[in-house]
Image (cartoon, rainbow, N blue to C red):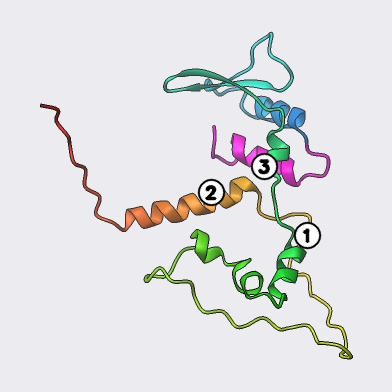
Amino acid sequence: LVEGRSGLLAVLNEECVRPGGNDKAFVTKIAQMNKASACLFRGKRFDVYDFGVKHYAGEVVYNAEGFVHKNMDTLPTDLQECATQSSNDILANHMNNDSMMNIGGSSSQGAAPKKKPPKRAPQKGGSSRTLQKKGSALIGQTVWTKFKGQLTSLMQSLGKTKTRYIRCIKP
């Protein structure tokens, strides 16, 4: 219900990248796509933004007002590329450093891989260099896709460890 192809989070991401995507359409789509699911419910007195999920601990009603807007927190790719061209070392070398956030895996030593220094724009009197667009400035990673990438990386790291649990007994 939550993470599947037609799950709540996939539909939320779809609404974020779809032009004109909104909260009402999100709730309508999840209700249509999950009609057969016993875990998702809509009450007769629910608002157009309300939907309910039957969790292991009981029923929880969510109000989806603002879900799409909150999940669209992206940094445009052209702005990221512009930052890497900066003369400021922090912006140029760390603005797009996903290894600091464990996105896409991490090295075994935990250190960030060495990057080539960014090409600088020519100084006074030089010809101007145009930035090439590597991706769309409109569709970037949403909050959910960033979170999912970080969570997957964390779970992979935890999977490589030998987890031990200590049971504490109160005297």
The magenta segment is 1-21
> Which residue, as the protein is rendered here, is positioned at the far bottom?
125
Answer with left or right where residue 18 lies relative to residue 70.
right
Q: Residue at x 67, y 81 (%)?
A: 118
Please determine whether, in this image, residue 149 is positioned above or below residue 36: below
Verify CB contact (< 8 Å) between mark 2 and mark 1: no
Comes first in the chain, label 2 or label 1: 1
Residue 2, image quadrant: top right
> What residue would you read off at disc 3?
71
Element on which disc 3 rests: helix
Q: Is residue 49 magenta?
A: no
Viewer-proximal residue among 108 and 112 = 112
Q: Is residue 103 visible?
A: no
The label on residue 137 is 1
Q: Residue at x 45, y 66 (%)?
A: 106
Element on which disc 1 rests: loop
Please determine whether, in this image, residue 19 is positioned above or below residue 29: below
